Structure formats: structure tokens, C-alpha cells
Amino acid sequence: MHEHEFGNKCRVKSCTGTSVPDTMACTDHQGVWKKYKLDHSAGSLAGSKRMLNRQQENLEWNPKDKYEFQPHDQPPAKVKKTKHYFGPATFYCVETICNPCGVVEAWAKFAKSESESNILAFINKIYPTKESRPDYICIDKGCQLLKHIAAQGHWDEWSETTRFIVDSYHYQNHRKTDILCRKWCDPAPTDGSAPNLVIPAIASDGSTYEKRAFNTQVNFIWSL
């Protein structure tokens, strides 16, 4: 019934015109349709960009991105309204939970943003009981997630089992004034509070020094 009633309609939003044969747009919106086909062609620069470029990479010869990416420690960007229905909507990202060895333990698709509420719902689903929760969860938004957990009243529950840390790259780039991140999310604290994260090592000259036990930048979310 849906195909019978709407299959020949223009797929530009709010348009009631009839599509030109072998296209998805009416006569007035053929320009929009042709641009969509060009941008999504495997032989076009835009098509090559989707296959070869990294996320958020926008080279000078590529068309400008129409999508806003959410910085890891900023609120989610506003979702832009759909202008047409030529193709299916895309998911914002795929979130994975990995063990330190690199084995993927679980994954989930986030439709619109990598928000703290989505992350919390994800890890609550994977670790439904206190017994199943890991000692450490490392994620680049660890401090933001910790703030969210505290604001939602779940801090007492999680603090009994798990410590949230950020990866070394983001820890070094977070501001020193971010006391919560510096105190609670250090991936290699030297105060003895997390001995599993810091191990002794021997330098080439025979001296002993402390180093990170895990490479926190290998995986996006890892649990231990």
C-alpha cells in the first residue's frame, strides 16, 4: 500500500510532486537529485572520500561536510533536519567495548550522538550486575561520563566496583583546572591508588622507573 501510494512521489521533504521516471525527484527537484547522485557515486571525489578519508578529515578538494561532529568532551551537536529521503539515514557511530588484549567484548550503534546517557545505558546493559563489572573502564569521555553518573545519582553504585579513566592522550590535553579529571580519571596515577595501572620497569642504564601497564590509546573503550 505504501509503495502504491507514495512510490512515485518526489522524495524531497514536503514535496507532493510526482517523480520523473528512474529518479526519486520531481521535475522541480531534479537538480537536488543529480547532486545527490554525484556526491554518492563511487567514482566521484565524494565517493572516494567516504572510502579513504578518516572521520572529520576534509581535504581541500572534497566538498564541505554537511554533518557536525561532536567533540569528545562537548555536548552533542544539534541534529540537522532532513531535506530529502533519497537514501537511508546513517548512524552517528558504532561504540565498542574491548578487552586490553584487543578482543571486542560488545558493540552498539548510537543513532544521533555519543552522549553520556547513551554510553551509560550501553555499559549498564553489558554489565547489569556488580559482579559482572570490570575494575576499570577507560574511555576518552571518562570524566564527562563520571560527571553524568554522579549527576544521575548512580555514583555510589558504580564507585563500589569500577574506576573510570581517560586515555593518556586526552588526559594530557585536558586542562589542569579540571580537578575531577585530574583526580579521578588519571590513567596512570602515581599515588598508589591504582597499582594495576602502573608497573615498575628497568631502563637501559639499569635504573628503575614506573610506566603505564596498558596502552590506553589502542581501543576506544576497554575494560579490565
Image: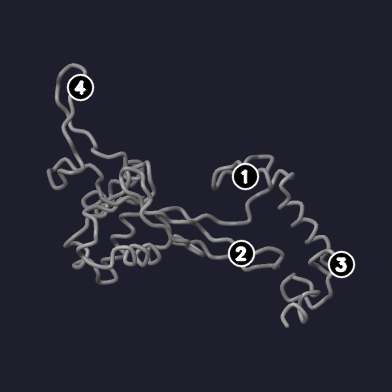
Instruction: Tell me the tag on residue 203.
Output: 4
- Earlier in the chain: of badge 3 and badge 4, it is 3
Percent coordinates x, y for residue 201 in the rendering: 18, 28
Percent coordinates x, y for residue 155 in the rendering: 22, 66
Nearer mark to the viewer, of 3 and 4: 3
Q: Secondary structure at mark 2?
A: loop
Percent coordinates x, y for residue 16 in the rendering: 79, 78
- Earlier in the chain: of badge 2 and badge 1, it is 1
Q: As rendered, which of 190 and 157 lies closer to the eye?
A: 157
Nearer mark to the viewer, of 3 and 2: 3
Percent coordinates x, y for residue 167 in the rendering: 32, 45
Distance from label 2 to label 1 (Cα)?
18 Å
Give the residue pinned by disc 2. 89
Q: Secondary structure at mark 1?
A: helix
Residue reaching furthest to the left:
192
Name which quarter of the figure residue 18 lies in.
bottom right
Nearer mark to the viewer, of 4 and 1: 1
Amino acid type, mark 2 = Ala
Name which quarter of the figure residue 66 lies in.
bottom right
Quarter of the image with the N terminus is bottom right
Going 52% across and 54% down the picture, which residue do you hit?
A: 69
Give the residue pinned by disc 3. 21
- Earlier in the chain: of badge 2 and badge 4, it is 2
- Earlier in the chain: of badge 4 and badge 1, it is 1
Crowd class of label 2 (few under 14; some 14 to 19; many from 20; radius 10 Å): few
Q: Secondary structure at mark 4?
A: loop
Going 20% across and 63% down the picture, which residue do you hit?
A: 131
Give the residue pinned by disc 1. 51
Distance from label 3 to label 4 (Cα)?
72 Å
Amino acid type, mark 3 = Pro
